[in-house]
Image (tube, helix red, strand yellow):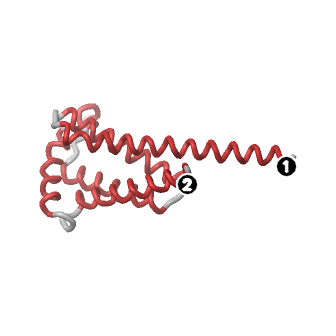
Amino acid sequence: MGSIVLSTLSIFLGLFFILVGSMKISPKINKEMHREIRRNFVQYAKVFPLAKTMGIKMPSKYFRVVVGWLEVLCGAILIFVPGVVKQLANIILLILMLGAFYTHTILEDKFERTAPSIVFALMLGCRLVVYMQVKRKEKKLANEKTRDTT
């Protein structure tokens, strides 16, 4: 059962991040949404977490494109690549969602703008928890099988 949940979450989250990342990169999916995203990233780049602490200025275009490609790449990995790489992609997306939450909070955006980052951070966190439970169960079964054969 956990494996079905894990697969379903991986596919759903992967498709979502491929779609959202694609809209950040290209206007081909939805021109209006892409234009709005471009406008928003001008504000987001101003509160980029490393800007103040390390003095790194991130141009909004590069910030948007890097986030978009990370979402597309990690989304595809969640769907198609097994093993540790998939968990790394999950963690990268979780960090991106926490960064999005931070950004919306600092900008004092309305809850409607902050909510998606909260929801998808929770879903990515749940996916990691389910993965750990499945791995623990598999390890327990393997240990029992080894004990039974000896």
For badge 2, the amino acid type reads Gly
As drawn, the residue found furthest toward the bottom would be 28
Q: Crowding near pointer 1: few (<14 within 10 Å), some, many (20+)?
A: few
Judging by the rendered image, the residue that carries numbered circle 1 is 149
Q: Earlier in the sequence, mark 1 or mark 2?
A: 2
Q: Amino acid at mark 1?
A: Thr
Q: Residues within 10 Å of mark 2 (few under 14, many from 20)?
A: few
**Where residue 102 appears, x then y in whole percent?**
27, 35
Pick out the residue farthest to the right. Answer: 150
| Residue 36 versus residue 45 in the image, above or below | below
Residue at image position (43%, 48%) is 90
Say which of 147 and 104 sits in front: 147
State the image coordinates of residue 98 (x, y, percent, origin top left): 33, 39
The secondary element bearing badge 2 is classed as: loop
Q: Quadrant of residue 12?
A: bottom left
Q: Are marks 1 and 2 in contact (CB under 8 Å)?
A: no
Residue name at image x 69 percent, y 42 percent: 140
Q: Residue at x 18, y 49 (%)?
A: 60
Where 48 sits versus 31, above or below?
above
Side (left or right) of 142 relative to 45: right
Residue at left offset 39%, top offset 44%: 123
Q: 5 or 100: which is nearer to us?
A: 5
Q: Residue 57: x and y, percent?
A: 22, 42
Left or right of 11 in this view: 43: left
Q: CA distance from mark 1 to mark 2?
A: 27 Å
Residue that badge 2 annotates: 83
